[in-house]
């Protein structure tokens, strides 16, 4: 069937008059060979502090109803600051994006997330054909996304089956003859892309299927039975918001141009699909998760790191001693109760985990419960302009300090004895991962 598949394609050249400070991309998008839309997209290469930068590479499934714009509006109304860019020539495939000048120019900039959407039919083809025609280019784009910034996260945008299946390819591959069959193949292929590339999946197609099964009277399709109408694009934008920010779209209030009841229903669908199955969509695949176990012999403990995605370690043993090995050994001089804290980090993220040990004259009794709840609480994390510290020790007068990953103190302020919560202005700090030291504890925080 390799030579019989049919799908729309069109080129998207760079405007020859672009300046070095901005790249303006003009794309002509063909939908079902009947209509064309001229898109003018401004891809900004300059970083702006506090913004979440999201690049969309796809085709008309992303361009119709301006999915990046809907995502921007939803996110902005939720209090996020985002900057989006997009390259979306009609019918484009992953293979074409790997060589398209506009796509390469966009990928040469630094982004927090790169959202990749394959041509709408290709991932639904047979596993053998997907393996040859889709997966190699998915992997190539995933690698290219991180060339300018190793912290860039790839999101594979799972699309949906056509309303009545793929009539073009049904005779040669029956599984795509119905919406359900085509959707299953799309789901399988996008999960494979995400898992094989250790990347995130935005399950828009699964959300569409859940919506259709829940209320078949609410139409998500344009008149061609393939592209989204505004309902479909709004649902997809809510899925993107939940996937990228890991926040509940059901709590949002921005309805766009939809009826409030319709918008609320679609937000609820996105919430159920994304957040109830976050592990399936690899939403934490890039995150550092600190953890460790303890082995003991009398006063000596051996710490066994089991953190995920960490490359650096900062240990505090509770007796004034520290270490930076992944799995250190430590000997206590005196009996007592000690909090062992690990800050595990990578260049992109950090996480804190603690355990308590009780050392007696002859043995160590381990309390294996996490004691992160005993740490001061920082909110929001990540944050942008202000952060709030609570659960501070009431009788502690030590200053509150913020350090960057290089150990340099970048901000400090005094604490009154009776105060257990404070507000800290952080708008002047660059984006990145920091350590906050307060109440005798050190824990991680990320500035957006």
Image (cartoon, rainbow, N blue to C red):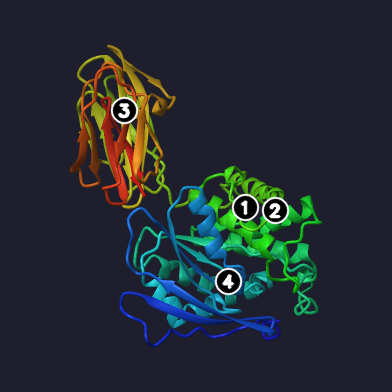
How far apart, in angstroms, are the residues tagged by discs 2 and 3?
53 Å
Kind of element beneath mark 4: helix
If you read the primary sequence from the N terminus, does the residue marked by circle 3 or circle 4 appear first? Answer: 4
Please give the residue where the numbered disc 1 appears in the rendered image.
Answer: 255
Distance between the alpha carbons at the discs numbered 4 and 1: 19 Å
Q: Quadrant of the N terminus?
A: bottom right
The Cα atoms of the two marked residues, 4 and 2, are separated by 22 Å
Mark 1: few/some/many CA within 10 Å (<14, 14-19, 20+): some
Instruction: Find disc 4 in the rendering and name its residue.
Output: 63
Nearer the observer, 164 or 46: 46
Q: Which mark is residue 340?
A: 3
Tags 1 and 2 touching, CB below 8 Å: yes
Foreground mark, 3 or 1?
1
- For residue 259, the mark is 2
Q: Which of marks 1 and 4 precedes in the sequence?
A: 4
Q: Position of residue 319 (x, y in %)?
A: 22, 23
Whichever of labels 2 and 3 marks the residue nearer the N terminus, that label is 2
Name, please, the residue furthest toward the bottom: 16
**C-alpha separation, residue under disc 1 versus residue under disc 2:** 7 Å
Secondary structure at badge 2 equals loop
**Residue 366: which quarter of the image?**
top left
Q: How crowded is mark 2: few (under 14 residues within 10 Å), some or many (20 or more)?
A: few
Q: Where is residue 342 in the image (x, y as percent from the top left)?
A: 32, 35
Name the element at disc 1: loop
């Amino acid at each position: 069937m390799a030579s019989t598949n049919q799908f729309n394609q069109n080129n998207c050249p760079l405007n020859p008059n672009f300046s070095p400070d901005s790249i303006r991309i003009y794309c002509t998008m063909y939908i079902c060979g009947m209509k064309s839309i001229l898109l003018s997209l401004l891809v900004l290469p300059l970083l702006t502090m506090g913004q979440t930068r999201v690049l969309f590479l796809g085709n008309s499934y992303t361009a119709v109803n301006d999915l990046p714009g809907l995502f921007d509006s939803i996110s902005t109304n939720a209090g996020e600051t985002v900057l989006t860019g997009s390259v979306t020539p009609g019918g484009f495939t992953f293979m074409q994006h790997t060589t398209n000048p506009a796509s390469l120019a966009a990928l040469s900039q630094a982004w927090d997330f790169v959202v990749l959407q394959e041509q709408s039919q290709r991932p639904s083809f047979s596993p053998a054909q997907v393996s040859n025609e889709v997966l190699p280019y998915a992997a190539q784009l995933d690698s290219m996304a991180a060339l300018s910034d190793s912290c860039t996260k790839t999101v594979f945008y799972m699309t949906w089956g056509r309303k009545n299946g793929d009539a073009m390819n049904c005779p040669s591959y029956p599984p795509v003859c119905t919406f359900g069959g085509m959707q299953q193949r799309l789901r399988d292929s996008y999960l494979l892309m995400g898992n094989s590339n250790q990347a995130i999946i935005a399950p828009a197609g699964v959300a569409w299927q859940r919506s259709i099964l829940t209320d078949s009277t609410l139409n998500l399709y344009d008149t061609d039975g393939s592209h989204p109408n505004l309902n479909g694009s709004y649902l997809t934008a809510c899925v993107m918001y939940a996937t990228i920010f890991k926040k509940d779209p059901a709590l949002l209030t921005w309805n766009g141009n939809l009826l409030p009841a319709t918008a609320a229903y679609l937000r609820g669908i996105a919430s159920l699909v994304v957040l109830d199955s976050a592990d399936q969509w690899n939403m934490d695949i890039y995150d550092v998760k600190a953890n460790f176990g303890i082995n003991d012999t009398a006063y000596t403990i051996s710490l066994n790191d089991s953190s995920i995605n960490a490359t650096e370690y900062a240990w505090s043993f509770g007796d004034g001693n520290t270490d930076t090995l992944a799995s250190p050994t430590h000997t206590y001089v005196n009996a007592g109760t000690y909090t062992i804290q690990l800050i595990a980090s990578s260049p992109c993220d950090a996480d804190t985990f603690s355990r308590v040990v009780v050392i007696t004259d002859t043995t160590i009794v381990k309390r294996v419960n996490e004691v992160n709840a005993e740490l001061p609480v920082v909110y929001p994390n990540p944050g942008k302009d202000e952060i709030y510290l609570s659960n501070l020790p009431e009788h502690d007068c030590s200053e509150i300090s913020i350090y960057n990953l290089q150990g340099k103190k970048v901000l400090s302020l005094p604490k009154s004895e009776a105060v257990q919560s404070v507000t800290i202005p952080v708008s002047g700090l660059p984006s990145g991962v920091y350590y906050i030291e307060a109440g005798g504890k050190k824990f991680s925080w990320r500035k957006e």
